[in-house]
Image (spheres, coloured by chain):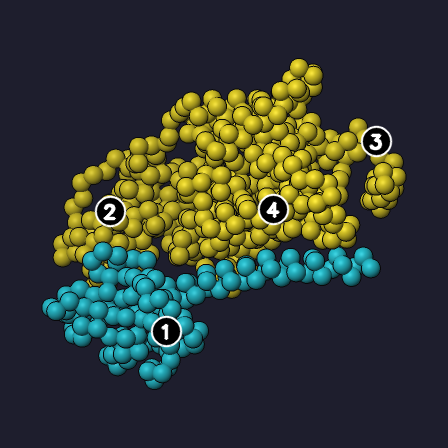
Chain colours: A yellow, B cyan
Amino acid sequence: MAQGKGSSKTSILSALGLARVDRKILVPAAMLFRLGAALAIGWMIHAHHVRATAEGDRPILASEVRDFLPETHTLSVDTITSRGGFHVLNRERSKIGYVVRTMPQSRDIKGYSGPSDVLMVFDPQDSLAGIAIRHSYDTPSHVEDVSKDYLFMERWNGQSWSELAKQEKVFGVSGATRTSEAVANSVFLRAALAEGLDQGGSPTFHFRWQDAALILTATAGMLLAFWRTPKIQRRKTWIHAAIVIYLGLISGDLLAQSLLSSWMEHGIPWKTLPGLVFLAAIAFLIPWATGRPVYCTHICPHGHLQRWLMKLVPARRKLRLHLDIQWGLLALPGLLLALVLTVVFLKIPIDLAGIEPFDAWALRGAGIATIIIAIVSLLFAAVVPMGFCRFGCPTGLLLNLGQKYKHGFHRRDGWLLGLLGLACFYYFGYEIWKPWLML
Amino acid sequence: MKLAIRLPILFILVLGLGSLVAQGIRKVRHEQQTRAMLLQVQAAVQDYHVDQERYIPRQELTGSQLISVLSDFGFLNELPINPWTHELWKLDGEEPDFLRYATDPNFETYALRALNPKTGEVVLEIDSVEQPSL
């Protein structure tokens, strides 16, 4: 068996022309590829979310910005700052300004009969070049009165983000007072949000006892993985039981696709959930750097439960899956990761918590789908050792995809390459599939 | 032998997950179509209000009836797409129609509601008081 694996590995390397390449080069190259691919996928998910939020249901067009900055050629989504807008680029792709729209943030600022979506264009010095009403749910005649009042529309030109954010008093347009006030207040609110002055600003660092407990859990997992003295290993079952009780039954902070995809979209909450972020960092970085799957082997409560079931059920009651059936089933976690990417990019209303059993550990908040998957996965694991981990866990595969391999590249790198390709298609092909989805 | 087992398993997995995605995409497209229809009808209702200085003086209207009125008054240049048939609204009263218009006794406010065909629950609502935007 081992010989078979070795020869297949050699043939893969030969096919890629890498059979003679030194492992000293292959191993770090593979590690760099995995890190780069994971970061690229994460970045594309985040950038797509920022772009979709900034565009909303009425994407900003370059032609709208050209009224203020005639050299406008392309709009490029801003993934660095929290302003949630677009960099304005000229034909040479140099930055010549910045643009945002006030909706959906200004949705609650109503004029006579509804809110208005206002375009805010800034010049390269970050001073307001002008505003325009893009669309309004207000009375059409009032909106027209406001847009034609140039004294009102140009009143804040030349002001910076911070100056706009501090504005309070508005002298409305006569005959359309409420509409014009709503337009101005939308501009002020959007600037304040961009400056972090509204909603209490950015969150501050917060460390609770639960964070300390999660850091302790991650440390215990690492201890079991790396400190292989008999003294520690004898206590392994007790440490695992303590992890199951705390992480599974008390905190319910298991790593899952719903959690990780939300972090990719909205940013990693290291200030508010430092313990959970530490646990996730350990789960990804330790296998990447050392090749040891610390989270799956020593931390995940669902894994421990399967391991205990495996020991409880006698061998004669176990099911031996045919190798070809195993081959087919091994594709499921990878296909589930592709499903996660599809759901995240296309904003499909599928609850990602429902494709894994991990939310069922938080007994009160679990949905029916999650509970069913949890029960089925445990029943399956009772007859097929570690069945869910091997044939059904997308989070486990995700952590394994980054795992260091002593020969350099591994067959599972093909999955990572495929997922990277899918993310690239969704991110760079946005303009192609967006109209088809009617977004 | 290998392919005879492996391919059907792979096919079943892809089909299962693909149907899940297809169902989700259908939901997204339907919601987007309903939103577009509501916004188009809302703009026409507001134009009617500006012109007539009141909302359509019928306390309740179905989608077909509402679109007929707006079309007759010339506030709808083109008929909206009926999200329940994915075709232009026919106005024959025969097609699936889950859009409802309502106004108050003084015709000073309006509400447009898209209903769930199976349960009758309001799926999307746009009105002049609480939710003027989608």
Q: Nearer the viewer, residue A176 or A298?
A: A298
How much space separates mark 1 and mark 4, taking CA atoms? 52 Å
Q: Residues within 10 Å of mark 2 (few under 14, many from 20)?
A: many
Kindly give the residue lying farthest to the left in the view shown.
Answer: B106
Quick one: quadrant of the C terminus of chain A? bottom left
Q: Going 24% across and 49% down the picture, which residue do you hit? A: A109
The amino acid at mark 3 is Asp
Residue A22 in the image: above or below residue A129: above
The subunit carrying tag 1 is: B
How much space separates mark 1 and mark 2, taking CA atoms? 33 Å
Residue B85 seen in this snapshot: yes
For discs 2 and 3, the disc positioned in front in the rendered view:
3
Disc marking residue B80: 1
How far across and down, in percent of the image, does residue A25 sit?
A: 78, 31
The amino acid at mark 4 is Leu
The subunit carrying tag 2 is: A
Residues tagged by mark 1 and mark 4 found on one chain of the structure: no
Disc marking residue A184: 2
For discs 4 and 3, the disc positioned in front in the rendered view:
4
Looking at the image, is mark 2 or mark 3 earlier in the sequence? 3
Label 4: which secondary element: helix
Q: Residues within 10 Å of mark 4 (few under 14, many from 20)?
A: some
The subunit carrying tag 4 is: A
User: Could you tell whether A379 is left or right of A21 in the image?
Assistant: left
Label 3: which secondary element: loop
Residue that label 4 marks: A379
